[in-house]
Image: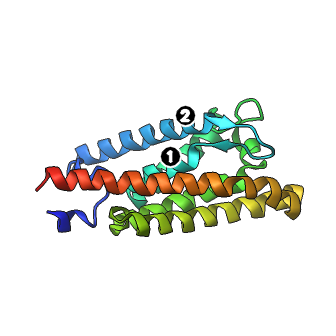
Amino acid sequence: MATALTSRSLVSTALPQSGTGRIVAQIMLAVAGTLLLTVSAKAKVVFGPVDLSLQTLAIFLIAAAFGMRLAVATLVLYLAQGAMGLPVFQSTPEKGIGIAYMLGTTGGYLAGFVVMAAIVGWAADRGWDRNPFKFFGAIVVADVVMLAMGFAWLALLIGAEQSWQFGVVPFIVPDLIKAALAASIVPAIWGLIAKFTR
């Protein structure tokens, strides 16, 4: 049984295998994922041009649970909601809404979230989320890519030095802690599943 599970995401173990029921369940999961992303975005600490939040942890967990395709679809839906003007982002509506907000200081990070979800989801699809060390490595790579995208966009707006100081450095330790949490939580859940499906 454990071998059969190694190429499946967490939620796929509970979803219908095919048909309309599976599609409906995936849509509901994507919507639930966007709600989690919204709540995690609002749990923030104001720091500077870019605030600290629980959103990266939420993305790590969504990508691990959903797998690459559904996680990316969830992040794209989330960005679409924001683009339509819904106050789903970290500092909306107080710092603007819609496309105008997305082109502001957090724009690179928002795009990076999709790439981050793809990388973490890809790793989870291959069973890396069963091993805390491999999964931690995948998460760190994904986070570095996301921070690089955020840095590049922010540098265009406020300069490279300030972008590094306010858009990268403050996130290094918190993101490592969140990566360690996700890399501990997800393999533990798989361990429980394996225990109860023997």
Q: Residue 108, image x and y in percent? A: 70, 57
Q: Residue furthest left?
A: 198
Question: What amino acid is at disc 1?
Answer: Ala
The residue indicated by pointer 2 is 39
| Secondary structure found at label 1 | helix
Of the 4 image quadrants, the one containing the C terminus is bottom left
Q: Residue at point 71% right, 30% down?
A: 93
C-alpha distance separating marks 1 and 2: 9 Å
Residue 49 screen position, x and y as percent: 80, 46
Q: Earlier in the sequence, mark 1 or mark 2?
A: 2
Counting from the top left corner in percent of width and height, residue 58 is at 50, 46
Quarter placement of the N terminus: bottom left
Residue 107 can be seen, yes or no: yes
Nearest to the observer: residue 80 or residue 43: 43
User: Dividing the picture into quarters, in which one does residue 127 lie?
Assistant: bottom left
Number of on-image labels: 2
Q: Are marks 1 and 2 in contact (CB under 8 Å)?
A: yes
Residue at the disc numbered 1: 58
Badge 2, how many Cα within 10 Å: few under 14, some, many 20+? some
Asked if 167 appears above or below 43 in the picture, the reply is below
Q: Amino acid at mark 2?
A: Val
- Relative to residue 143, is residue 34 drawn left or right? left
Q: Residue at x 57, y 45 (%)?
A: 55
Q: Taking the image as drawn, is residue 18 in sight?
A: no
Tell me if 61 is positioned left or right of 11 in this view: right
Other-residue count near label 1 (Cα within 10 Å), few / some / many at <14 / 14–19 / ≥20: many
For image coordinates 78% across by 48% down, the residue present is 104
Q: Position of residue 151 (x, y in %)?
A: 75, 61
The residue at 15%/49% (across/down) is 196
> Which one is nearer the viewer's eye here, 188 or 103?
188
